[in-house]
Image: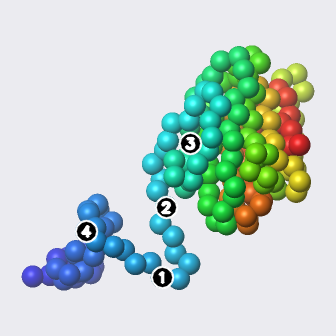
Amino acid sequence: MAQRVGKYKLTKRDSELNLTDGGVVNGNINVTGDAQLQVINPVSGSDSAITVSKGTHGGRTTIIPRGGDSLVTHLMPLPEEGVKYHFVYVGDAVRAEDIEFSADASGADFEGTILHHHEGANDSVDVVYCKPDEDVIDLKIPQAFELTFVGKNATTYYVWGHSTSETVPTCS
């Protein structure tokens, strides 16, 4: 017997193929064209240096915890076209803590913009442009940030996002 979903009648076969209300797929899913599936469950970051990997961080949101008084470096892997990395920090400013993203070891570059909300005596908004041949982004004593990296090709990441702190981030 057919089941109603809104104004539509679904057969038993239609109902088995519909996973909008949850469910399990047994077997392979074949996707054609330019469609991609994305895992969206977050992964916990680290308050110390980490090596970013496609398997752990690719296609996911990485939440970076508040750290100590040190530099926290995220070593980016070689970019792959279309692979996305998303980082969020909402840990409040910690004296002497910088958070850095580096593609130096992989030989890759960053290209894009970061909108920076300057906090302090002279509140303002700045745009930081990372141009090709720059492979380090340094967020100086961040209060909050959200950055997205997407592989443009095998040597370059597109980057965009925003940051908030008293000091403008740098691309070098």
- Element type at marker 1? loop
Three-letter amino acid code of the residue under disc 4: Asn
Residue at image x 45%, y 48%?
A: 41
Say if residue 160 shows up in the picture: no
Residue at image x 62%, y 36%?
A: 50
For marks 3 and 4 on the same chain, the one whose residue lies earlier in the sequence: 4
Residue 118, image x and y in percent? 83, 32
For marks 2 and 4 on the same chain, the one whose residue lies earlier in the sequence: 4
Say if residue 170 shows up in the picture: yes
Give the residue at mark 4: 26
Give the residue at mark 2: 38
Give the residue at mark 1: 32
> Mark 3 to mark 1: distance in Å?
29 Å
Three-letter amino acid code of the residue under disc 1: Thr
For marks 3 and 1 on the same chain, the one whose residue lies earlier in the sequence: 1
Asked where in the image residue 96 lies, by quadrant, the reply is: top right
Crowdedness near tag 2: few (<14), some (14–19) or many (≥20) residues, C-alpha within 10 Å:
few
Give the residue at mark 3: 62
Residue 172, image x and y in percent? 89, 43
Relative vertical location of residue 66 with respect to residue 137 in this rendering, above or below: above
